[in-house]
Image: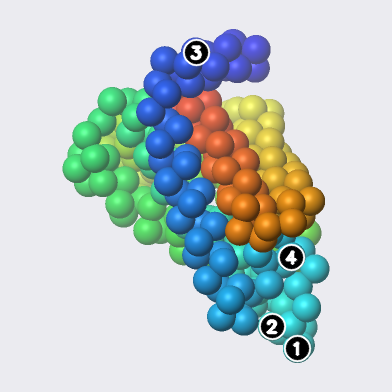
Amino acid sequence: MNAVAARTFAQLCAKPAIAVPVVAFAIAGAVAENRLAQSGFSSWTAGGGLFAQGATVFNAYAATIAALGLRVLFGLAVTAATAGIVNRMPLRILATRTLETLAVLLLAGLAAAALAVPTFGISMLLFVPLSLFAVAIAAKDRRSAPEAIVDAIAIMARNAGPALVLAVGVLVCGIAGVFAARLIPVPMAGALIAWLVLEAATACAAVAVAGTALC
């Protein structure tokens, strides 16, 4: 793990362009979340959704799925963009190689979001490393979505320790960002900080996978 951490840090220092998708998708995520909150559908702005107060339990659960679904969507976007930057891949080629895999992972991520509450977060704990490895494989090796996902599962099994560390790291950073954002009196600013923390953690994990021997 020390070697992986060192190589990841070197990659981050050598490719500052990784910050661009992190900031861009963090802003997009914060704006989308804010719009949902203003529409009355979601109470997740600046982390409020951890204590969602809908008229019914169904409304609270739907708000939770929507919030996690947004994080899945923009997390996948950051993961793919980071893999492309690490591999010095033009956007057109990156999209061609990863679009199918991203579509399948988005559906899997939405399912994981729906199961997050009844499984106490285990579904998201499994989805995070799966998405990191599958996107990196699709970008690097031009694998189809089924092949990339099967290969990702095999690599996760061989690297269970590092995969668990990456997943826990991303999820803990996401939760920490949400709670830190609650300390900021301006809701939109708090939401943006929470998204920046999460997307930065996702990008670091994506670099650890795409730019090292893990994948």
Residue 55's disc is: 1
Q: Residues within 10 Å of mark 3 (few under 14, many from 20)?
A: few
Amino acid type for the residue under numbered disc 1: Ala
Label annotation for residue 48: 4
Label at residue 187 = none
| Mark closer to the chain start, 2 or 3 | 3
Q: Secondary structure at mark 2?
A: helix
Q: Residue at x 56, y 37 (%)?
A: 200
- Looking at marks 4 and 1 on the same chain, the residue that comes earlier in the sequence is marked by 4
Q: Say above or below: 149 vs 29.
A: above
Q: Earlier in the sequence, mark 3 or mark 1?
A: 3
At horizontal 61% and vertical 58% (from top left) the residue drawn is 188
Q: Quadrant of residue 2?
A: top right
Would you place residue 205 above or below residue 148 in this image? above
Query: In front: mark 4 or mark 2?
Result: 4
| Whole-number angstrom distance, CA of label 4 to CA of label 2 | 14 Å
Q: Which residue, given by chain and number where applicable, does mark 3 sit on?
A: 10
Q: Which residue is mark 2?
A: 59
As shown in the figure, which amino acid type bears the numbered disc 2? Answer: Asn
User: Marks 3/1: CA distance?
Assistant: 49 Å
Q: Nearer the viewer, mark 4 or mark 3?
A: 4
Callout 1 environment at 10 Å: few (<14), some (14 to 19), or many (20+)?
Answer: few
Q: Is residue 83 above or below residue 16?
A: below
